[in-house]
Image (tube, grey):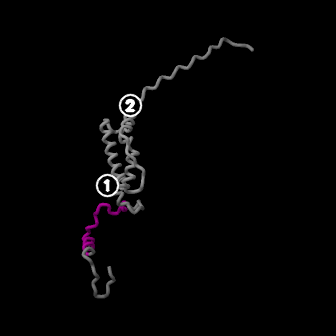
Amino acid sequence: MAQVRDGERPYESAIDRAVREGAERGAFENLPGRGKPLPHLDDPSEDWWLRRYLDREGISREMLLPPSVQLRKAIDRLPETLAALRTERAVRDAVAELNVRIVEHLRFPSGPRISVQRIDADAAVQQWTDARTPPAPPEPPAAPPPAPRRRGWRWW
């Protein structure tokens, strides 16, 4: 507020007046969180509000990455993604969807230049099949050969 001279009223905006009148009525006495520290004070970064928004809305932080980095991460996670699928058709569909994203990025690249290449669907299906087939049971270990028998004491 501006400094007040004798006999003059200071300028008070409508917002300042509403806050002052609310405080006089006691409207701010029982607010939730009163007396508690602000929740973001322990995070010194400038984008604390963005992190909290993403967490609250359930949005992955990877959505903020450039498309080329997102594709590289999707390619690196492909074996884990395919392991959760049940049928070969679903595996081929997932690889085809990723290949569409890769081709679109190769046509119109954006972000940092990161090498991304199309995924071979047949190789992905083969890896998926190999990962799903249980390994053959191990052969039981061969019995050790019997120890030679000693024939009594030998005196030298």
Q: Earlier in the sequence, mark 1 or mark 2?
A: 1
Query: On screen, 129 above or below 22?
Result: above
The residue carrying mark 1 is: 56
Q: Residue at x 37, y 41 (%)?
A: 120
Q: Position of residue 102 (x, y in %)?
A: 35, 49
What's under tag 2, amino acid-wise?
A: Thr
Give the magenta range. Answer: 17-39
| Up-down relation of residue 16 to residue 144 (above or below) | below
| Foreground label between 1 and 2 | 2
The structure residue drawn at horizontal position 57% and vertical position 18%, both measured from the top left corner, is 145
For the view shown, which residue lies furthest in the top direction?
A: 151
SS under mark 2: loop
Can you say whether 148 is above or below 83 in the image? above
Q: Quadrant of residue 148?
A: top right
Residue 29 x %, y %: 28, 66
Image check: 145 left or right of 53?
right
